[in-house]
Amino acid sequence: MPQDISRKPTACLALADGTVFYGQGFGATGETVAELCFNTAMTGYQEIMTDPSYAGQIVTFTFPHIGNTGVTPEDDETGDPVADGMVVKWMPTDPSNWRAAQDLSAWLAARGRIAIGGIDTRRLTRAIRQQGAPHVALSHDPEGNFDIAALVAKARAFRGLVGLDLAKDVTCAQSYRWDEMRWAWPDGYARQTNARHKVVAVDYGAKRNILRCLASAGCDVTVLPASATYDDVMAHDPDGVFLSNGPGDPAATGEYAVPMIRDLLDKTELPIFGICLGHQMLALAVGAKTIKMNHGHHGANHPVKEIETGKVEITSMNHGFAVDSQTLPDGVLETHVSLFDGSNCGIRMADRPVFSVQHHPEASPGPQDSFYLFERFAASMDRAAG
C-alpha cells in the first residue's frame, strides 16, 4: 500500500540523537516519550500492544501489514494497551477478518495510544540495531505543528529503563482467581473445572494467555501482586509458584521480589516456574546477575535451543535485559540458549524442581513448540505430591 508523500505530516518521531522521522498519525493525539524497540512478528500486534512487558516502550513493527485484521477483545493480554506507542510502515487499512470488533486506529485512540505510519521502518530498525534502543519522543498533531527542538530535548531527558521498576505499575492491585483456559475451536475459552494443583502466580505484568496455559495444564491459579511476601504466598498453601513476565529493569524489581523468592527456596521444596521477568527474578534470587542488552529480543520467530535435548524451538520473545550466564552459580544449569546471539534463555536448579525460561511459551509461534514447559511444571507438582 503506497503512501501519499505529498500529504502534510501529522506525526513525527524524534530520536535523542536529533534524527527526526515524519509520517501520518493515527490513534490518539498528543506526545509520549519512551524507549524505542522493534518487533519482527508478522502477527499478533494487538497482543504485543497489550503485553505489560512493553511498558515504557514504543514498538516499531518491521512487518508492514499492521492493523489489517482489526482488533478483538478476545486477543487482549491485559485490559488496555501498555506499550506507549506504535510505529508502522503502512497506514492500517480497513479490517478484514471475521473476528474483528473494531479497527486499530479507533482502538488506539479510545485507549490513549499514539501511532505513526508512513515510516521507513527498515532504516529505523537498522538504527536501533546499530545504536542500541534509543530514547524517543512521538508526537501526533492533526495540524502538523511540531516543536522539534522541544521533542528532541524530551527524548534526551528520558531516564531510560535501567534502574526502573515498572512491575509495580502494571501488576494487579489485589489478588484474584483465574480458571479460563486456552482458546479452542469452536467454543472459545473454556473454564478449568477439574484442577489438580493449586498454583500461586506472582504478577509482575502477567499476560492472560500465560494464566490460560497454567489453567489448561490443570492448575487452579491464584494471582498475587508483585509485592507479595513469602507469607502472602504461603497463606494459599500452594502446590507450586509461578513467576510471571513483566517490564523494566529486573534489578530494580528484584529489590522486593528477590527476598520473597529466596525465602521460598530456603524454606520450602515447592516447584517454581518463571517466564521472562520471572526468569530474571529467579536468576537474581539464586545469585546470578542481569545485563541490559543492546536492542533486546522482540519477535515471534526466535530460535531457542534446549541444551540437554538439542531440540530447537521457534519462540516469542520480548526482553531488553538478559541473565548473564557467566554469573550462574554452581548447582544452577543453563538449559536454553538463543541461536541468534547465544544469550541465556533458560535455567534450572540441578537438585530442585525449579526452572525458568526467557521466552514466552504461551505465545505459541511454533505453534506448540514450548507448551511442554507448562506440562513440565505440572509434572513436577505431581511428583512433589507423591
Image: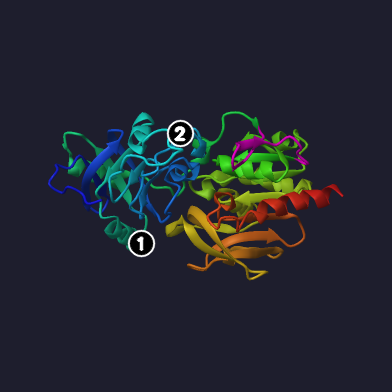
Pointer 2 or 1: first along the chain: 2
- The residue lying furthest to the left in this view is 6
Please name the residue shown 25% across and 40% down the image: 25
Please say if 186 is above or below 368.
above
Dot 1: what SS? helix
Cβ atoms under marks 2 and 1 closer than 8 Å: no
- Three-letter amino acid code at the position of disc 2: Asp
Pointer 1 local density, CA inside 10 Å: few below 14, some 14–19, many at least 20? some
Please name the residue shown 44% across and 39% down the image: 98
Q: What stretch is highlighted in magenta?
A: 178-197
Q: Nearer the viewer, residue 177 or 53?
A: 177
The numbered dot on residue 80 is 2
Dot 2: what SS? loop
Q: Which of 229 and 2 is in front in this view?
A: 2
Is residue 189 magenta-colored? yes
The numbered dot on residue 2 is none
Residue labelled with disc 1: 129
- Three-letter amino acid code at the position of disc 1: Arg
Of circles 2 and 1, the one toward us is 2
